[in-house]
Image (cartoon, rainbow, N blue to C red):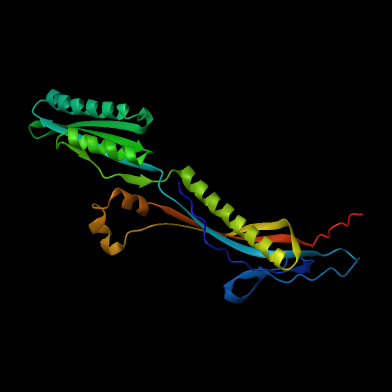
Amino acid sequence: MSLQKASSSRVFVELVPWADRGQENNLVSGGETLPGLRRPLSAQGQTSTREVHVSGTAEVSASPDRAQVAVLVSSTKEAAAEAKKSVCRRLDYITQSLQQQGLQSENITVTKDIRRVENAYHMEAEVCITFTEFGKMQNICNLLVEKLDSSVVISQPQFYHTPGSVENLRRQACLVAVENAWRKAQEVCNLVGQTLGKPLLIKEEEMKEWEDQIDDHQSSRLSSSLTVQQKIKSATIHTASKVFITFEVKGKEKKKKHL
């Protein structure tokens, strides 16, 4: 799974002493919201806290991590036994070829169906194969096309993401957005001669997900003629996260004089 960091983050800064954490957000230019200015504590001589408020964004993407291919084997014979024999012979070859290529049994599902069609028997067997290595998938599909006759139909691969990979992508987008915001806050504090302190608030404000889609005008015409790489690209998921972080700001540390 390939991850791509966003090129930049958007940063908003406010360095003020404050007292009231419960104030509502105020609208600022560009449609963004930032907490309103906090008033310094004036009673009991309490020490005020200064903050820097930062918004950070990030976008990451991940290619699909699974593909499924269906192999359909069929035969129509006057006798049921002959139809079964014809299908099972090719079915055995398919399963043996998959095992020789290192595929595990949990990634192979076989279903069989036999029915009467007029004065004959028609039998079908479907082998559903789940791949994690797309190069191996192409090699196996090519092998089956070369070795088996036209009664064997191999479907186009269907690419998808496992739930775990999608959740990991969302988490990664949020972490990268936090990292981008922290780096910007660090640069701002360095610029104004301050020291960045601990985070006081971290909030994910927005999370978006989308896939690369084929143009609707061309989708019906191209869906059956897309290459494997084009199918992988169209199934790639993009996730964008926006976070808002409040950091404590400390004064510049004074260097101790050595006697």
| Quarter-of-image position of residue 26 | bottom right
Q: Position of residue 188 (x, y in %)?
A: 68, 66
Taking the image as shown, residue 14 lies to the left or right of residue 2, namely: right
Q: Most extreme residue toward the bottom, as rendered?
A: 29
Residue at the spot x=36%, y=28% of the render? Answer: 105
Q: Position of residue 28 (x, y in %)?
A: 63, 75
Q: Is residue 94 above or below residue 25?
A: above
Q: Position of residue 34 (x, y in %)?
A: 66, 69
Say how many tags the image has: 0
Report if residue 98 is visible in the image. Answer: yes
| Quarter-of-image position of residue 57 | bottom right
Q: In which quarter of the image is the C terminus?
A: bottom right
Q: In this view, does 54 lie above or below 61?
A: below
Report if residue 206 is visible in the image. Answer: no
Residue at the spot x=26%, y=45% of the render? Answer: 156
Q: Where is residue 20 in the image (x, y as percent from the top left)?
A: 77, 66
| Quarter-of-image position of residue 196 | bottom right
Residues 257 and 50: in front is 257
Residue at the spot x=35%, y=29% of the render? Answer: 102
Taking the image as shown, residue 204 lies to the left or right of residue 163, namely: right
